[in-house]
Image (spheres, rainbow, N blue to C red):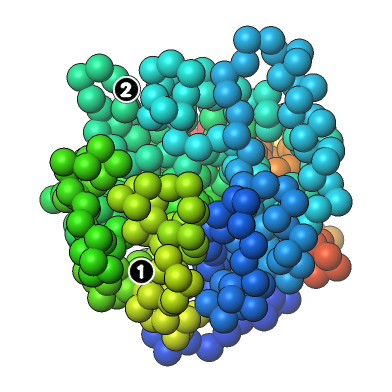
């Protein structure tokens, strides 16, 4: 929806090496979603139950939980707080990252909802969170460069007068303005649907599932084209359907009564949320339903809102939401990067009267798919005759800008000459590649000599 337009440029995507599925909808983007579920800490959930739900990801809160799901991708929430001793903090993160190395954990989320005071040591501060994220990211990558680092999922909210909650859009913009885009592999977000359907227009309603589109627009404004991971989302089922009376007079439910939807609405909204993201948001990766089994946390008050997002009832019975998600059509991602090359123009006019090496333009490499674990090779395609293309640098990561130069020495005939640059990598022995095309226009005038 917020894709940047390209001007005076032809982009060619080379993806013949990647398998493609056939779709019932011609306009559906290639498979890009992961299907995830939250597993409560201090509980045991039979892996077969997660298999039955059709999820290929789990989100966990204790590293040891990963062993129960050897055939799933795993996101682990690493809870960190604003440090008072930075060397000790770095040592703590490094030790934690080392401990994850052999535990079948694919990704870590750095904290949780830092735009809320109950998740921060004092009132939320985006600049502080970025500093913590930067140190955590670089420390984790030094220990385990292959692990995916996801920024803390922001809570969709509005700023309160006492700033104990800060508008997620303002918080995200301040994060991005302070360079956060360099310190995560994917942006974490919690697009709860509140009491509205997943298709509700974010320009007409403040707090809706599609508010993530406004987050994505901010990312593109700051030139960050990494995936957004929906690390929590869901709808709150009305406790009255299970014979439990909860309202704003109950301190455990205060502020949540207005979120209630029926069990049928919860089920339909969850399925439609996955469908909407699948068809409209090619920049979204794994989506994690909150939650599978918090209803079975015996220490929680019966009116704790956490219980009523659950897909299992207190006795373990599956809700209608569980059953409808189980039956939902899926298009699983192949978890491969998807490169985009962005430029305003990549062309130059030269005179045969004064041929010389000169800039052709520049382009930026972005990855809108799964995080890229290796460096990319940037390679000009040159034949035996001019013009010849040169690039700098020749090795890059997503987010890098490539400068392109043209050497037309030896050209003798006026005309338009296409030039090409390949950007490619090998991932697990399989190639991924994209090419960009520019033009050199040669004439016999002496203009510009």
Identity of the residue drawn at 45% across and 52% down: 232
Name above or below for residue 271 compared with residue 188.
below
Return the residue at label 1: 270
In this orientation, which residue lies closer to the viewer: 197 or 187?
197
Mark 2 or 1, nearer chain start:
2
Q: Is residue 406 left or right of residue 192?
A: right
The Cα–Cα distance between marks 2 and 1, rounded to whole angstroms, is 29 Å
Q: Sort mark 1 into few (<14), some (14-19) or many (20+) by Cα contacts within 10 Å.
A: many
Identity of the residue drawn at 60% across and 50% down: 41
Name above or below for residue 31 compared with residue 41.
below
Residue 346 seen from this side: no
Q: Secondary structure at mark 1?
A: helix
Q: How many marks?
A: 2
Residue 241 seen from this side: yes
Image quadrant holding the C terminus, namely top right
What percent of the width, then of the height, locates residue 273? 35, 67
Q: Is residue 55 left or right of residue 252?
A: right
In this orientation, which residue lies closer to the viewer: 56 or 20?
56
Identity of the residue drawn at 73% across and 76% down: 17
Image quadrant holding the N terminus, namely bottom left
What percent of the width, then of the height, locates residue 327? 44, 85
Return the residue at label 2: 164
């Amino acid at each position: 929806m917020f894709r940047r337009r390209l001007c005076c440029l032809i982009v060619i995507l080379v993806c013949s090496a990647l398998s493609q599925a056939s779709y019932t909808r011609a306009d559906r983007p290639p498979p890009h979603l992961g299907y995830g579920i939250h597993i409560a800490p201090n509980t045991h959930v039979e892996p077969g139950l997660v298999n039955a739900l059709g999820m290929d990801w789990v989100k966990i809160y204790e590293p040891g939980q990963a062993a129960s799901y050897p055939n799933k991708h795993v996101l682990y929430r690493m809870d960190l707080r604003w440090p008072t001793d930075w060397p000790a903090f770095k040592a703590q993160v490094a030790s934690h990252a080392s401990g994850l190395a052999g535990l079948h954990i694919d990704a870590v989320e750095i904290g949780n909802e830092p735009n809320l005071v109950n998740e921060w040591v004092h009132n939320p501060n985006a600049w502080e969170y970025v500093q913590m994220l930067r140190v955590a990211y670089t420390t984790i990558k030094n220990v385990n460069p292959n692990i995916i680092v996801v920024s803390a999922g922001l809570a969709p909210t509005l700023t309160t007068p006492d700033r104990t909650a800060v508008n997620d859009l303002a918080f995200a913009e301040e994060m991005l303005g302070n360079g956060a885009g360099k310190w995560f592999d994917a942006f974490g977000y919690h697009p709860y649907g509140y009491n509205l359907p997943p298709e509700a227009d974010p320009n007409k309603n403040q707090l809706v599932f599609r508010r993530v589109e406004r987050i994505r627009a901010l990312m593109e404004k700051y030139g960050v084209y990494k995936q957004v991971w929906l690390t929590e989302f869901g709808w709150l089922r009305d406790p009255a359907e299970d014979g439990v009376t909860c309202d704003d007079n109950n301190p455990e439910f205060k502020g949540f009564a207005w979120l209630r939807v029926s069990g049928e609405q919860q089920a339909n909204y969850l399925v439609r949320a996955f469908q909407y993201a699948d068809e409209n948001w090619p920049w979204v990766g794994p989506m994690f339903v909150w939650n599978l089994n918090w209803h079975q946390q015996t220490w929680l008050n019966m009116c704790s809102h956490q219980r009523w997002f659950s897909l299992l009832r207190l006795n373990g019975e599956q809700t209608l939401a569980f059953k409808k998600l189980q039956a939902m059509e899926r298009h699983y991602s192949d978890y491969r990067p998807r490169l985009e090359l962005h430029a305003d123009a990549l062309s130059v006019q030269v005179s045969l009267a004064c041929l010389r090496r000169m800039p052709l333009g520049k382009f930026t490499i972005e990855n809108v798919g799964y995080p890229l674990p290796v460096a990319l090779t940037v390679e000009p395609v040159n034949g035996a005759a001019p013009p010849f293309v040169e690039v700098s640098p020749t090795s890059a990561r997503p987010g890098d800008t490539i400068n392109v130069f043209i050497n037309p020495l030896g050209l003798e005939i006026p005309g338009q000459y296409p030039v090409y640059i390949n950007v490619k990598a090998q991932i697990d022995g399989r190639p991924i590649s994209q090419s960009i095309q520019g033009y050199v226009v040669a004439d016999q005038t002496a203009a510009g000599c």
